[in-house]
Amino acid sequence: MGVALALAARAGREGDVPVGAVVVSPEGELVGEGRNLREGRTDPTAHAEVLALRAAALALGSWRLEGCTLVVTLEPCPMCAGALMLARISRLVLGAWDPKLGATGSVWDIVRDRRATHRVEVLGGVRESECSQVLREFFAAHRADGVRGVGP
């Protein structure tokens, strides 16, 4: 989670919502990382989780990331929850829960839906206060600057 927090902080410094994610192999090796780049790339799909999954798939030479763990500072949205299921991620470790758009246990629970063909183990609240603080500081600064339209 420490690496994901560092990536989140970098995203925030670059003007994007501070979310960071890493993929860890079954052997414990970091095989992919990502940070939010929606603003910088003008790409609505450039979420930290999607970028980390893409990097891991390239590093491992397969889109099937079975046995891998996705570690992310903020609970994934519906798009990212779908992506991690399609990638066959086995475990999700998340920092802060997202009461507005969370799709892995708070608002929705896409990754454990009984109709799904793949289910993901979810461990939430890891270093939650640190992950939440990064987001609170980012949004407080943007509200103070009068910036609108930036959100998770």
Image (spheres, helix red, strand yellow):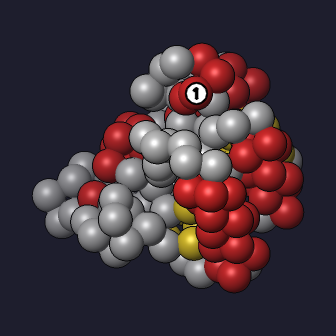
Residue assigned mark 1: 39
Q: What's the residue at 64%, 22% (across, down)?
A: 40
- Determine if residue 136 is in view: yes
Of residues 132 and 122, which is closer to you in this image? 132
Residue 49: give x, y in percent of width and height. Answer: 57, 42
Residue 29 to residue 90: above or below: above
Amino acid type, callout 1: Glu
* Quadrant for the N terminus in the image: bottom right
In the drawing, does residue 61 fall left or right of residue 38?
Answer: right
Query: Eyeballing the image, is 106 above or below 147?
Result: below
Instruction: Look at 18% across and 65% down and name the residue there.
Output: 114
Give the answer, above or below, for where 67 lies relative to 55: below
* Viewer-side residue, 13 vs 23: 13
The residue at 55%/29% (across/down) is 38
Residue 147 x %, y %: 54, 43
| Residue at position x 73%, y 46% in the image | 12
Query: Is residue 92 found left or right of 83 in the rendered image?
Result: right
Question: Which of the pair 87/11 is nearer the observer?
Answer: 11
- Residue 53, quarter of the rendered image: top right
Helix, strand, or loop for circle 1? helix
Q: Is residue 93 visible?
A: no
Residue 39 at x, y = what percent?
Answer: 58, 27
The image quarter in which residue 5 lies: bottom right
Query: Looking at the image, how many numbered discs can be counted on the residues?
Result: 1
Asked where in the image residue 133 lies, by quadrant, the reply is: bottom right
